[in-house]
Amino acid sequence: MYDPYSVLGVSRQANDDEIKQAFRGLAKRFHPDTPEGSADKGRRFTDLSIAYEILGNQSKRRSYDRGEIDAHGNPRANYTPRPEPAAAEQEFEVGDVATAERPQAKNGHANGEAAGFRGTFEKAFGVGPATEKKSRVEELFGEFFGERSAGRKRPAPGKGLDTHYDLHITFEEAALGGTRRVKLPSGNRFDVKIPVGVKEGQTIRLRALGEPGLPGGPAGDALITIAIEPHPYFRRDGRDIHLALPITLNEALHGGKVKVPTLQGTVTMAVPAGANAGQSFRLKGKGIPGTGLQASGDQLVTLQIVLPDQSDPHLSDIVKRWETAHPYQPRRKFGDA
């Protein structure tokens, strides 16, 4: 089984310097532009780059050691840090990117847009981003391999790694959809379309916005996992919205019209006289809006009779006298309970 530690030939207890030294030595040996370069070396070089991308990054290394991601940096199928694993398996394709701003470096390339192996080697060999037409990484390899490597076959193109981010959105954004501006660690900013009815743990995939690929290879994708902030009084069940609505004792006894908050704004609802706590009413079409073949959900309003905050001796006396004259047993269905 592919394992970054085995690829680099280091133990799981290896420190950062040991990992970097191992990568440097193997990278010189297996770089495809060496005189003995071959397709096999190109594949080995790609494996080395991917392994160092994981182990050379402390955050990714910890995630790999905990079993959260696989050897290629992708989330493991059996790792479910969120409460809705079924929803987490779903992805939204995003053509969903309204605009994209890429910061420009002095050489005219967007930050982080150099060849995939370049970013890895800049980290491993202690050089920074290229600011001239020829990067310092390329100059470094010129020293290692000499100008005789010029014109030789480049490494086989390889797709860049996917990158993973969490996006925290409000309950209303999740229910109604919208657009949220996202800033990635690379500095790129994107307006991401949030689909109507997105669920906790679902993923929005931004094509070609992940790690750059090996020379000539496509970039990986950016995977944005949705985290939804809880709402103070709405609760979601599929496409339906639930609300516990407080009413007064007078409203329960005599009925009346009350204002009810919904995702689409405040509406008026009639409460019948003699309404009980726990009684529910359905507001059609006031849940998650419909999309495609899916119909709109409803809002279910459950009544909650609330007594005054302050104890009222007069009210207490009235209720006691009334109950004496009109005894009843609300728990009779429980038998002797």
Image (cartoon, rainbow, N blue to C red):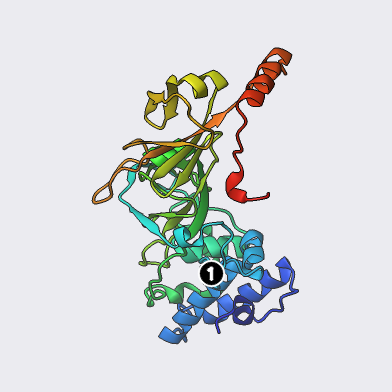
Q: Residue at x 59, y 39 (%)?
A: 330
Residue 31 image point, x, y percent: 50, 77
User: Is 78 situated above or below 180?
Assistant: below
Residue in front for this viewpoint, 241 or 87 = 241
Q: Residue at x 52, y 52 (%)?
A: 165
Instruction: Look at the image and tell me whether residue 297 can be seen.
Output: yes
Label count reads 1
Label 1 is placed on what type of residue?
A: Arg
The answer to whether 290 appears left or right of 20 in the picture is: left
The answer to whether 123 appears left or right of 35 in the picture is: right
Residue 29 image point, x, y percent: 56, 81
Q: Secondary structure at mark 1?
A: loop
Residue in front for this viewpoint, 126 or 158 = 158
Q: Quadrant of the N terminus?
A: bottom right
The answer to whether 206 appears left or right of 314 in the picture is: left
Residue most toward the front?
Answer: 325
Q: Residues within 10 Å of mark 1 (few under 14, many from 20)?
A: few
Residue 157 image point, x, y percent: 38, 72
Residue most toward the top?
Answer: 314
User: Is 242 situated above or below 151?
Assistant: above
Residue in front for this viewpoint, 271 or 93 = 271
User: Is 281 situated above or below 6?
Assistant: above
The answer to which quarter of the image holds residue 121 is: bottom right
Residue most toward the left?
Answer: 293
Residue 203 image point, x, y percent: 44, 55
Residue in front for this viewpoint, 235 or 333 = 333
User: Is 254 situated above or below 208?
Assistant: above
The answer to which quarter of the image holds residue 104 is: top left
Instruction: Look at the image and tell me whether residue 180 can be seen.
Output: no
Which residue position holds label 1? 76
